[in-house]
Structures are given as structure tokens and as C-alpha cells.
Image: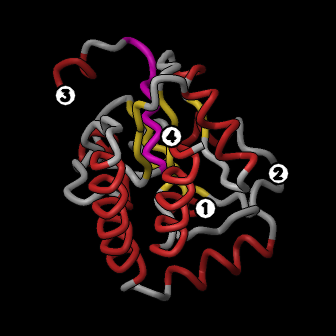
């Protein structure tokens, strides 16, 4: 990876919005500190701060002044700042969140495969599920009050993207899929 990055003439921006929720995530910080790479991370995703815009960039010192030119004057409101400080004081949260995500992801993966849906291995906090027709399954689930994303815009229209939620939510999803399959 480092040799590829070294050949890039401009600035490479890597979106690591979900990196802190992945077990055994690769460490890109040394690459960002020593080259023309910017890592973007999202505290909103890390700490489930729905509705709050809070993130940060990691880059080498020579890139930071260039980034600052594009930063709005009031880029982080005071509420988001306070929320950010509060979540950073809970040093165990991310580890617990990763454990819950992996447990619930294993539950979903096993059950979806048992129902006949191919599920590629995922290190993220979501699954891609081959339903044969992502839009159709999205619409069927939506009529039952469950929101998933069809993956046509990703170039894989047979798939839906399922976020890993609470175990109760995962059980509800499986139950609902079984009901739809019986219809």
C-alpha cells in the first residue's frame, strides 16, 4: 500500500468512518503522518451520535494548513464539541461496541446463511446480503417497518446492506425475513 501511495502525485484522502468499529483494523496513521495522505474519521459513527456532525482528519503537518483553508469558520457547534468531549471520557466504549457488533453480526450471518442468503465475509459494522433482487427485498422489508439499503448504487443490485443493530433488532429482522419468505 505504501508504494502505491508514494506514486500518487496529489493528496490521497481515505475515508475511515468505520475504522474504529472494525476488529483488527489496519493502522494507516503512520502513512498519513509521513506522506500526502489524509485520513478522515467520524466520531458520529464511532459513538452512535446520530444527527451530530463530528469528525476529524489525521495528516502530516505539512498538509494541515492546506486543509484549514477549506474549514468553515464554525465547523463544529458547541453541542457537538461537548458531546465529543463526553464520549472521549468513556475509554471502554469502542471495545464494548466492537464486541456487540461482532456478536450480533455473527448471529445475523449465521441465520441469513441458514435461510439461503449468501453473505460475504465482512469486517465492517454492516453486512452485504445477496437477496437476488435488492430493491425488491428493500421494499418488502420497508412495508414491515424495517429499513435496509439496496445496493444498486454500489453496482451490486442483487444485494441489500444490513446495518448491525441490537440483538433484538437482529432477531426482528430474521423473523420478518422468514415471514416474507412464507408469503
Label 1 to label 2: alpha-carbon separation = 20 Å
Quick check: 59 above or below 53?
above
Where does residue 158 sit, x and y in percent of width and height? 48, 22
Q: Magenta includes 15?
A: yes
Question: Which mark sits nearer the N-terminus, 1 or 2?
Answer: 1
What residue is shown with label 3?
2
In this view, which residue lies farthest toward the front?
182
Quickly name the residue at label 1: 44
Callouts 1 and 2 close, C-beta under 8 Å? no
Q: Are marks 2 and 3 in contact (CB under 8 Å)?
A: no
Q: Residues within 10 Å of mark 3 (few under 14, many from 20)?
A: few
Query: In the image, which residues are magenta?
Result: 9-17
Disc 2 and disc 3: Cα gap in Å?
A: 34 Å
For label 4, count other residues whose C-alpha is less than 10 Å away and answer few (under 14), some (14-19) or many (20+): some
Q: Secondary structure at mark 2?
A: loop
Query: Disc 1 versus disc 3: distance between alpha carbons?
Result: 28 Å
Q: Nearer the viewer, mark 4 or mark 3?
A: 4
Give the residue number, with chain letter if any, for mark 4.
161
Residue at 37% of width from left, 52% of height from top? Answer: 19
Which one is closest to the eye, mark 4 or mark 2? 4
Q: Which residue is mark 2?
A: 73
Amino acid at each position: 500500500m505504501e508504494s502505491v501511495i508514494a506514486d500518487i502525485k496529489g493528496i490521497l484522502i481515505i475515508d475511515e468512518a468505520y475504522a474504529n468499529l472494525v476488529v483488527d483494523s489496519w493502522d494507516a496513521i503512520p502513512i498519513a503522518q509521513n506522506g500526502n495522505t489524509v485520513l478522515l474519521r467520524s466520531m458520529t459513527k464511532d459513538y452512535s451520535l446520530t444527527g451530530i456532525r463530528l469528525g476529524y482528519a489525521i495528516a502530516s503537518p505539512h498538509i494541515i494548513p492546506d486543509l484549514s483553508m477549506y474549514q468553515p469558520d464554525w465547523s463544529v457547534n458547541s453541542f457537538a464539541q461537548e458531546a465529543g468531549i463526553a464520549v472521549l471520557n468513556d475509554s471502554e466504549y469502542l471495545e464494548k461496541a466492537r464486541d456487540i457488533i461482532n456478536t450480533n453480526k455473527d448471529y445475523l450471518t449465521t441465520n441469513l446463511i441458514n435461510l439461503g442468503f449468501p453473505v460475504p465475509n465482512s469486517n465492517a459494522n454492516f453486512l452485504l446480503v445477496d437477496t437476488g433482487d435488492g430493491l425488491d427485498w428493500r421494499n418488502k422489508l420497508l412495508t414491515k417497518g424495517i429499513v435496509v439499503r439496496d445496493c444498486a448504487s454500489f453496482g451490486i443490485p442483487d444485494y441489500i446492506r444490513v446495518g448491525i443493530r441490537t440483538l433484538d433488532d437482529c432477531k426482528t429482522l430474521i423473523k420478518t425475513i422468514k415471514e416474507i419468505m412464507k408469503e
